[in-house]
Amino acid sequence: MKLNLNIQPLESWINVKNEPLIISGPCSAETEDQLLSTAHLLAATGKVSVLRAGIWKPRTRPGEFEGIGSIGLEWLKRAKAETGLPTAVEVANAKHVEEALAAGVDILWIGARSTANPFTVQEIADALKGVDIPVLVKNPVNPDISLWIGALERINNAGITKLGAIHRGFSSYEKSSFRNEPMWELAIQLKTLCPELPIINDPSHICGNRELIPYISQKALDLDMQGLMIESHIDPSVAWTDAKQQVTPAALEELIAKLSLRDPESKNEDFTDKLAELRKQIDKIDDIMLQKLSERMAIVEKIGQYKRDSKVTILQVNRWDEILKKGTAFAKALKLDLSFTEKFLELVHGESIRKQTEIMNEGKTEEEIVEASAAVKS
């Protein structure tokens, strides 16, 4: 299924000074001097195309700094006049949209918390009707691609065709080196559904610390993302919000200089021919894998029928342990990633359980089968 979005290409609505597109500026506009000083240093790098700054900051708990408010828009206007950089801010309701538009802000983005709420997104969409302005939509806090797609559709339905997405990672209960798990597969899935949609990566919010930003930035570019949104502050050590994930303008310039840009396609005929041949080999292997999976599932059905007729339970823990130990040992010998192997085996095992559950519960409703399958997995 492809997304039917009516959007304009990125280069038609943002003047990219250098590739990749770099959107940068402080997490929060704190004082006029802080914002203007940072903006001038960013402009001097010659690598930043858009100045960003948080004006309204949705915080997790009350009492934390929630943004300088509307006065910050005047500072942004002055920064734009002095540096020539177009400006971008986050909006979370209709009032924000109206004030940002009145202040001449060039690009709006919708934050992760707002994307998670269709009511909020629709309010913003309604406020944007009849307006011609670029809008970027961050992924929702939780890994739900339908919410992300729904937000993009709502903004597009309001008539916004200068539309893009921001990949800023997803919340997870698992401890990790990242503030938000990248879950690259979801951004890739969105790109697959809508290849023409510009996707910009936000390494600052994925990392939560400045040390990992270069790694995530390079990986995003290697995955053919169109740009980066990196938070920059004249002195991150005294930043009022998210101090650890902001970099100085000088550090940003150095970071960008070290990034490697790679073309999504090569114009070299020899490369293209060799790549096509290698892809043919992969296609053949994929066909064999799917055929073997089909054969495996046919045997699974026979096992399910045999268990049903013999009144034996579906799940047999010892057998699953045997499959997992044997599979991971074999994967290790084949130099396959163990984490990938475990996930693959779990997917195959889960499908086997689903098929056997259907056989065991023939004649029951779909809801009853789902409940039975969930009980087995738990």
Image (cartoon, grey):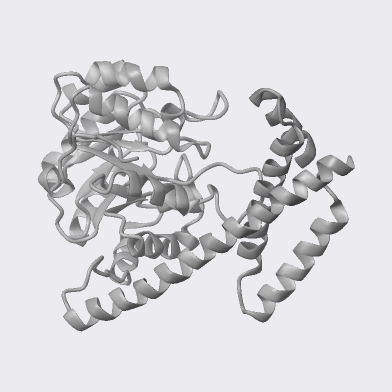
Residue 101, compared with residue 217, is above or below; it is: above
Residue 277, compared with residue 360, is above or below; it is: below
The one of 376 and 51 positioned closer to us in this rendering: 376
Q: Quadrant of the C terminus?
A: top right
Residue lying farthest to the bottom in this orientation? 270
Residue at point 38%, 38% (across, down): 138
> Foreground residue, 164 or 339?
339
Image quarter (top left, top right, bottom left or bottom right) of the N terminus: top left
Q: Is residue 313 visible?
A: no
Q: Is residue 187 left or right of residue 101?
A: right
The residue depicted at 88 percent of the width and 43 percent of the height is 310
Instruction: Give x and y (percent) for residue 313.
Output: 86, 42
Residue 79 percent coordinates (x, y)? 19, 41
Q: Work out whether 130 lies above or below 303.
A: above
Tell me, yes or no, if residue 156 can be seen here: yes
Q: Number of callouts in the render?
A: 0
In the foreground, 111 or 31:
111
Where residue 106 sits, quadrant-wise, is top left
The relative height of residue 230 versus residue 360 in the rendered view (above or below) is: below
Q: Along the horizontal axis of the image, is 295 left or right of 373?
A: left
Report the side of 124 relative to 327 (left or right): left
Q: Please state the horizontal and vertical placement of residue 339, each as a whole percent of the image.
A: 64, 63
Residue 47 is situated, as x and y percent measured from the top left of the image, at 21, 60
